[in-house]
Structure formats: structure tokens, C-alpha cells
Image (cartoon, rainbow, N blue to C red):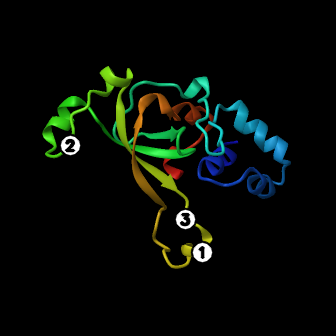
Amino acid sequence: MADAVTRFLSGDAISEIAAGLYRSSGFVKSIIERTGVPQKGEGTYDYLPEECVAEDFVNGEIVWSAKYHGPAIIKQELSVDYQAEKAGMSDINYEKKYGTKAYNIWVIEKITDDYSDRWTTAQGGGFTATQLAYDLGKLTHLQEYGVDLSRI
């Protein structure tokens, strides 16, 4: 179960996971749904499962980005105090304007096989983004199923 969830969060397709586990795609999909793993949509925001909903995150925490349909790492909360310390950064009170906190995140992307032979030491690719807390989901509940979030 943990292997299927970890591979799904890492970007593997359900059919690839099913082939690797010698199980049907329906079996793997039911594992993903039962454990409360966020679904990957096509170009739209998806609702987060109830287990993932949260308002506060800590730096370094691995979360799910509903906007980018993948895992991300919390880099920094964009609090009013933090923005005031940074020269050139506009001061926006996200909690007042949007009713929730905002965070700088690193969106984790899987390196395609075309580049894996050139970048053998790379852990993965990604990019920086800013996202509101209600579009981020906690993944800590998956640790109950034996999922090691550091492997994503």
C-alpha cells in the first residue's frame, strides 16, 4: 500500500504502478482513494480530501498543491513581518485580503527518463511558486499507512 501511494505521489501513472505490483489499475486506484491521497486533475483545481485540509504549515513540510497537482515543499510563510524584512517585496496582508495565509513553495517535478542518464545525482526538478493555504493539503495522515514522505 505504501509503495503504491509513494509512487503515485512521485508522479507515476496508475497503470505503471499496477504493472509493477502485478495488480489491476482498479485495485491501485481503490488504494489511492481509500488512503485519502489527493487526485490529479487536468488543468483545474481539485478538491482536497478531508484528511488533507489544513490552514497552517511549517517550513520544510511536504504538502500537496491543488493548483499544480503534485507534491511541494513549504519554503516560507509570507507573513506581513517577513515581507517587511525583504527589500523590494510588496507588503500584502494575505490573511486580510484572502482570509488565509500564503506560502512560498517548491513544486516537486519528476525528472523524465530523457534526462536521468545525464543527471544521475539529481533528486528531481521543480520550480518556486506562491500559493494560498487553502490550495495546499497536508500529507502527514499518509504516514499512518507507512508512507515515507521524504521519498517523494
| Relative height, residue 97 to residue 21 (above, below) | above
> Mark 3 belongs to which amino acid?
Ile
Question: Is 13 situated left or right of 129 in this image?
Answer: right
- Marks 2 and 3: in contact by CB < 8 Å? no
Is the residue marked by circle 3 packed among few (<14), some (14-19), or many (20+) residues within 10 Å?
A: some
Residue in the image at 31% along x and 20% along y: 96
Q: Is residue 100 left or right of residue 81?
A: right
Place residue 131 in its image quadrant: top left
Residue neighbourhood size for the residue with mark 1, other residues' Cα within 10 Å, grouped as few (<14), some (14–19), many (≥20) = few
Task: Indicate the secondary structure of the residue bearing disc 1.
Answer: helix
Q: Secondary structure at mark 3?
A: loop
The secondary structure type at the circle numbered 2 is: loop
Whole-percent x, y for residue 130 in the image: 38, 42
Tag 2: amino acid: Met
In front: label 3 or label 2: 2
- Tag of residue 111: 3
Whether tag 1 and tag 3 are in contact, CB under 8 A, the answer is no
Q: Residue at x 52, y 25 (%)?
A: 53
> Spatial distance from mark 3 to mark 2, Cα to Cα?
31 Å
**Residue nearer the viewer, 45 or 111:** 45
Outermost residue toward the bottom in this view: 118
- Name which residue lies at 55% across and 29% down: 52
**Disc 3 or 2, which lies upstream in sequence?**
2
Q: CA distance from mark 1 to mark 2?
A: 38 Å
Residue 78 image-quadrant placement:
top left
Crowding around mark 2 (Cα neighbors within 10 Å: few <14, some 14 to 19, many 20+) is few
Q: Which residue is mark 1?
A: 114
Q: Which residue is mark 2?
A: 89
Q: Amino acid at mark 1?
A: Asp
Q: Residue at x 46, y 71 (%)?
A: 121
